[in-house]
Amino acid sequence: METRRGIAVSPGIAIGPALVLDTTGIVISQRTIPPQLVEAEVARLADALNRAAEEAEERAAIMNARLTPDLARDIGGILSSQAELLKHDHVLRYRVDALIRNHHYSAEYALSRAIGALVRELGQAGGPFARLTTDLRDLETQVLRILLGEQSDRVPETHEPMIVLAHDLTPSETAQLNPERVHGFATESGGPTSHTAIMAGALEIPAVVGLGRFLDDVTPGDIVILDGTQGLLILDPDEATIARYETIRRAQFSSVAFVAEPLRDVPALTRDGVRMTLMGNIEFPSEAGMCLERGAEGVGLYRTEFLYVNKSTDPTEEEHFEAYREVLTKIGPYRPVVIRTLDIGADKFSSVSGMLSGEKNPFLGLRSVRLCLRNLDLFKTQLRAILRASVYGDLRIMFPMVSTIMELRQCKSLVLDVQEHLEEEGIPFKRQIPIGTMIEVPSAALLADVLAKQVDFFSIGTNDLVQYTLAADRNNENVAALYNPADPAVLRLIRMVVDAAKREQVEVNVCGEMSGEPIYTPLLIGLGLRQLSATPRKLPEVKRIVRALTVAEAERIAREALRMESAREVTTYLREQLRRILPDAAD
């Protein structure tokens, strides 16, 4: 028996035989064509691109039929956007055409060269645009298979329950997975914010990505256990492990209704009567309904990057406005909706080539508010839409990646500037809108006492705070082991932020993945947090833990954890405490 740890992207337990997908990719060697065949080769490429676009639209239609109308629009739209790129991305077509015309490359080789260059550039750009590398490779495979006359579907139809194992799954392949037959999937590569991960969550298929190399150790048909909650893949499990996970799986299956439904409308009160506020993190407007279904008291983090990614043009003010109004209307007038302004790392967004920053170190470069403050038209378009939507509910604005007091002041000044213009135009908006900043870089945590004087609330983004504090990219398998929210350095920064916020009577929330993991719930409460924001499906379990402990217990746990010297020591201790508070929650 062997256990591999990866990144959990869709919760649940799956036990069954492995379906190992063929890992041999399409190898394209350099080939040139005679000059007189150039125009015919350009036409052959155009035909393949058009056919691939039609197939992408067909897959989008299949996905749309599986989901609710709201989810179909947002999740199915990922596949529709592939069709749009194939049809209308003139930059990609220009690059490939130029390679055919100027170098007389074959259509296959020209396509591979052009997309390979784009993938490298996007990878260097980092941020949410890094997810486009998988989408581009997906498109490349689809078009190449058409050019070569090969079968376009890599995922075979199966009549028996299976767990799909692959080096990676593209969005188009994920769309083909039938939840009635495919009970889960695991991949060697991939990250938590990829389109594949998002679609797995929408289909509610347990999934783990970023496991590193393991396919060589699996034979098709081997029994495996996939733990999409803890991010584990267990190869060749023994009978005792299978029995234990069967018990967990049955308990989780029955507890969805057992936990979610009874707790949806009850307050998140500790046993000694202290109120916690639990809110949802969303990426698409359709997820607002999920927040209400799972008992969220509002939206603590509304990511807005979906408006920019995979689009051939920048989103208009009206597109921004309609997305924000939809969420506010669904959530209702008395629940807060915190809209995070653009949080991506590139300098233009109007085409694939325009998304590239070309920076040597984009994670420490021009991204988030730094980018917005350099592109004021882009920033003001979003701010105008946010302010216009404010009349539809309890809207709040949050700026990401603030690292200095000057950045925060500039952002607030721009809000005032946009408000003045709207007032001059006679466009209604709320004058008093709470403004907050994310605390996700160490400098912001260290300056929390200064920043707290300028804002109405903080939101601690633990994903980036952990990454920047420990200088460890969790998607880099060479250093992923260093990425741990339980590291004492991270805990001390969180406590520092909470203490600074308390002195200035500023609300503080946690909106990173840490807030949705039950093991950290007692710790965060003990550190002084009274607001948590997580993926909607994780809220019932967090609420169950909140209602099972007292603040005194949580404070004792936090004090002990802060005395410890290593993340491993803290994690072991937190597991023990969670098992004591709620025995079945730590399994």
Image (spheres, rainbow, N blue to C red):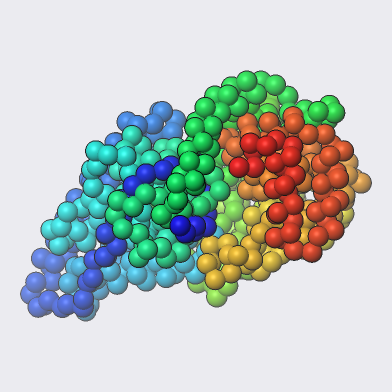
Q: Quadrant of the C terminus?
A: top right
Q: Position of residue 231 (x, y in %)?
A: 52, 51
Q: Is residue 38 left or right of residue 538?
A: left
Q: Position of residue 413 (x, y in %)?
A: 75, 50
Q: Is residue 221 visible?
A: yes
Residue at (13% x, 67% y) in the render: 41
Q: Position of residue 215 (x, y in %)?
A: 36, 62
Q: Quadrant of the N terminus?
A: bottom left
* Residue at the extreme right of the image, as rendered: 503
Residue at (77% x, 46% y) in the render: 523
Q: Quadrant of residue 259?
A: top right
Residue at (41% x, 63% y) in the render: 214
Q: In this figure, what is the number of numbered marks?
A: 0
Q: Position of residue 354 (x, y in %)?
A: 45, 62
Q: Is residue 194 visible?
A: no
Q: Is residue 420 left or right of residue 46?
A: right
147 vs 237, nearest the viewer: 237
413 vs 304, nearest the viewer: 304
Residue at (56% x, 28% y) in the render: 255
359 vs 67, nearest the viewer: 67
Q: Is residue 13 left or right of residue 520?
A: left
* Residue at the extreme left of the image, as rendered: 36
431 vs 17, nearest the viewer: 17
Q: In the picture shown, does residue 135 fall above or below 245?
A: below
Q: In the picture shown, does residue 103 fall above or below 537?
A: below
* Residue at the extreme front of the image, as rendered: 239
